[in-house]
Amino acid sequence: MSDILASEPHRVVRVGEVEIVLLGTAHVSPASVEAVRALLATGDYDAVAVELCASRQRAMFDPDAMGRLDLFSVMKNRQVAMVAASLALGAYQMRIAEQYGIEPGAELRAAIDGAIDGGLPLALIDRDIGLTLRRTYASVPWWRRMELVGGLLSSVLSRDKIEESEIERLKQGDMLESTFSEFAEQSETLYRPVIEERDRYMAASLRRFAAERGSGRVLAVVGAGHLAGIERHLADTQPPAETLAELEQAPPRPRWPRVLPWVIVAVILVGFVIGFSRNTDIGLQMVADWVLINGGLAAIGGALALAHPLTILTAAVGAPLTSLNPTIGIGFVAAAVEIFLRKPQVGDFATLRRDVMHWKGWWHNRVSRVLLVFLLTTLGSAIGTYVGGAKVFGHLFGDGG
């Protein structure tokens, strides 16, 4: 065993009566896979821990899970952006596998397979990826969030060829770190949820697992970039349950995003009332501008998504109305019409993960195109609400009575 570890980055840490061997792996390295298999073949370990959460494990062992999406539930529960991000990350991984013949995370799969074959207890020690993404998004100032989203999309969608430099970065960290590395290096607030918090979380998970085990030796397979942080936090004195509870808290949802749409609706309706009270022509012009701007931008969003013509028409007609009713968005309405007109077939679900490997596939696959219809019509209507609202009040303060 010592010969195997001598050639691999690792740390050996005792937590109570449990010896934890932290094996630092490169998530795109065949050598890391062989090291994991060789260590488990020695029979020197009583348990295994891996840098995965339950959702990432399911995605790894059930790659067709995305093909069983309930699109209406995804839209109703406001999970479209999260599903799109998961598809994008999955596409990034598949492109690496296709381009370089390397399956990202193969060493984690080998660790899980080895634990199952050896009848060893298995611990998934990483934080849920969805929660990490939400905390990451919430950690950056609102004016940088579109930059963050754009960075994610450009990292995983814009290039068919993945550069060697990105592969080298993956050899030191993991998928999230590689995707957000440019931002993490520049932003302490982003570094914290993506890297530091996960180091703390995995260390606390290991301390809890060690307490449950009582004694023995655990092989913990983690990205090499996490070694130092996990080793440091294994010495924390805060009870692991408290640390995990702290890091599992969803970011608080500010009240203003829920209140602001109603305020905007009230302000615009008051503007209409004032306009008509001054002059009927002004009021009619305000309504016409509102319909043309809001409906036009939502329709442009539908067109960019290559939606069915009737879906685009629905967006144009419906957006001016749904924008005055925050309980329902034009994205949901337009996506529902798109589903009715172009029903996704079984084949679309079956090929979803492979189709979104390349940016054209997002428009080719009927499932991913529904997500684009939802996102782009919603974005178009949101822009139209602010632009149209400004135009409405421009009549009040510019045209006079």
Image (tube, helix red, strand yellow):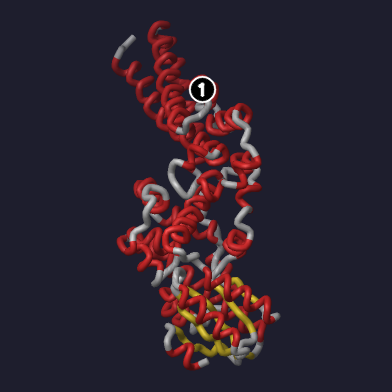
How many marks are shown on the rendered structure? 1
Q: Is residue 318 above or below residue 73?
A: above
Q: Is residue 145 visible?
A: no
Amino acid at pointer 1: Pro
Q: Is residue 279 visible?
A: yes
Q: Nearer the viewer, residue 328 or 85?
A: 85
What percent of the width, then of the height, locates residue 204?
55, 76
Residue under the point 46% across and 86% down: 11
Q: Nearer the viewer, residue 101 or 339?
A: 101
Residue under the point 51% across and 32% down: 262
Figure quadrant of residue 40: bottom right
Q: Which residue is mark 1?
A: 309
What percent of the width, then of the height, locates residue 51?
53, 71
On the picture, is 378 further left or further right than 351? left
On the picture, is 40 further left or further right than 363? right
Figure quadrant of residue 391: top left
Q: Is residue 269 above or below residue 38?
A: above
What percent of the width, then of the height, locates residue 361?
48, 42
Residue under the point 41% across and 13% down: 275
Pointer 1: residues within 10 angstroms few (<14), some, or many (20+)? some
Image quarter (top left, top right, bottom left or bottom right) of the C terminus: top left
Q: Is residue 274 above or below residue 248?
A: above
What percent of the width, then of the height, locates residue 317?
51, 19
On the picture, is 19 further left or further right than 88? right
Which element carries disc 1, helix, strand or loop? Answer: helix
Q: Is residue 150 above or below residue 180?
A: above
| Residue at the farthest right position | 119
Q: Nearer the viewer, residue 307 or 326?
A: 307
